[in-house]
Amino acid sequence: MQKPSQIEVDTLISQIAQGNEKAFEGLYDSYSPALYGVVLKIVRDEAVAQDVLQEAMVKIWKNIHSFDSKKGSIFTWMLNIARNRAIDELRKMKRSGGGEIQSLSLDVNISNGNNPTIREQEIGIKDLLKKLPAEQMEVMEYLYFQGFTQQEVSDELDLPLGTVKSRARIALRDLRKFFTLLLFWI
Amino acid sequence: MDIKEYIASGILENYVLGTVSDQERQEVECMSHIYPELREELVLLQESIEQIALSNAVPPPAELKAKVMAAISKEPQVKEEGGKVIDLNQADNDSKPLNTWLSAAAVVLLVAVCSFFYLQNNQYIKLEQDLISTTNQAEELKEESTKLATEVEAIKAEKEAQLNLANILANENTARIALNGTEASPESRVIVFWNKESNEVLMQLENLPEPTQDQQYQLWAIVDGTPTDMGVFDYTTALNKIQQMPYKVEGAQAFAITLEPAGGSKEPTLSNMYVVGATS
């Protein structure tokens, strides 16, 4: 997926802040696959994921004025909204006992790749992700995609809390290194 | 505060993963206002998360877009509260010195608030460390007590063995046989206690030369003129206490000790006999 340039994003945001629905459509087009991918991975149900994404998008539209570019990018802000909404939903599902807790897939990339251009650009990232040790990825899966706290991951995987903390740290650091390399390759 | 150390603590990673406490979240947001390098670090980490999301991208069904667009057109945006909008004309009327003074005060306040968060969190970390060290101490105490329990067991077993020895020694059927030094070693002397009912054999070293590393003393009983193995023994252990031999013997006429290669021999090496004594 092609991220829009910073200038394009800034323009979109100020237009959306003025109530421009067409501009919001642009934001949707740019980011909905990434948001949907994360939400789907968390709730593991397409119908639920679509509801969650819709609610998240409405929240983004409603609260665009509270977005503060000093705190981070629009993408991070949108991701946080979508992820939090999805994790709330996941907890609700677990509480009601409806969705059995499925075993985690360590395969980070679950894109069905029906868009050939997305597919090609992803190959590099996918290969890089594979270089992360499975144990680090597992901790990241629980923290990011399951919304576990570090203590919960520690209990779940029977690992000392310090190990969970350091694996999460190392995973993020390594990912960052890989992506920096990737920028040079493209 | 050492900002490099703060970055290395891993709190930023937790912040971007959303696994920090409210206290820590406020602290990170506060600190990143003061330290630009913290903000840069945060941006880089957030990009990692963005990349994870991008690599996971799945296009949602096309019809969802229409639903979302319909939903937002019904939803009014939340504007920022009116109080926050500054009346520019009025702002112009404010005197410059007051403005400068106010922003200076704001910075001081910001630093104060951040320090508060930081100190409070540090205190929490310290408490956590105290807890860990207390837990470690408890672990050590537990190990220590397990060790002591093992020692108590060993002492009990030892006492049991001593009691058993004392019973054998006090028994009326136990004969005390002095084994005296042979020509090769006239100074040597060993006492054997032999119970003719239970056939148990005990031994006390009084004087025997220390063997070399690759040699061991071996006790023999002579039964009908034939030497019978009564077992080898450790010299140092035997020096300090009366010890019970592993084998029993019936109808022994004599006992003798020879020096053999470590582990003992099947037949005694008679040229290495140190002590010998008849039972009657």
Image: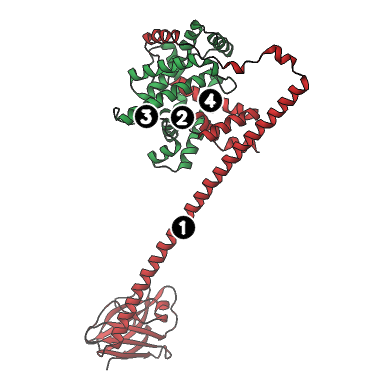
- Looking at the picture, how far across and down is residue B152, in whole percent? 38, 69
Q: Nearer the viewer, residue B216 or A143?
A: A143
- Looking at the picture, how far across and down is residue B72, in whole percent? 44, 10
Which numbered disc, 4 or 2, marks the residue closer to the eye? 4
Is there CB contact under 8 Å for labels 3 and 2?
A: no
User: Of the residues shown, which amino acid type is indicated by label 1?
Assistant: Glu
Which numbered disc, 4 or 3, marks the residue closer to the eye? 3
What residue did someone put label 4 on? Answer: B46
Q: Is residue B22 left or right of residue B93?
A: left
Helix, strand or loop under label 3? helix
Which corner quadrant of the image does residue A180 belong to? top right
- Whether discs 4 and 3 lie on one chain: the answer is no
Tell me if residue A132 comes above or below residue A119 in the rendering: below
- Looking at the picture, how far across and down is residue B56, in whole percent? 42, 21
What residue did someone put label 2 on? Answer: A131
Chain identifier, red in the render: B
User: Of the residues shown, which amino acid type is indicated by label 4?
Assistant: Gln
Residue appearing at x 35%, y 28% in the figure: A92
Residue farthest to the bottom, as pictured: B280
Is there CB contact under 8 Å for labels 4 and 3?
A: no
Colour of chain A in the rendered structure image = green
Q: Nearer the viewer, residue A147 or B229?
A: A147
What residue did someone put label 1 on? Answer: B140
User: Of the residues shown, which amino acid type is indicated by label 3?
Assistant: Arg
* Label 1 crowd bin: few (<14), some (14–19), many (20+), radius 10 Å: few
Decide which of tag 4 and tag 1 comes sooner along the chain. Answer: 4
- Looking at the picture, how far across and down is residue B270, in whole percent? 34, 84
What residue did someone put label 3 on? Answer: A91
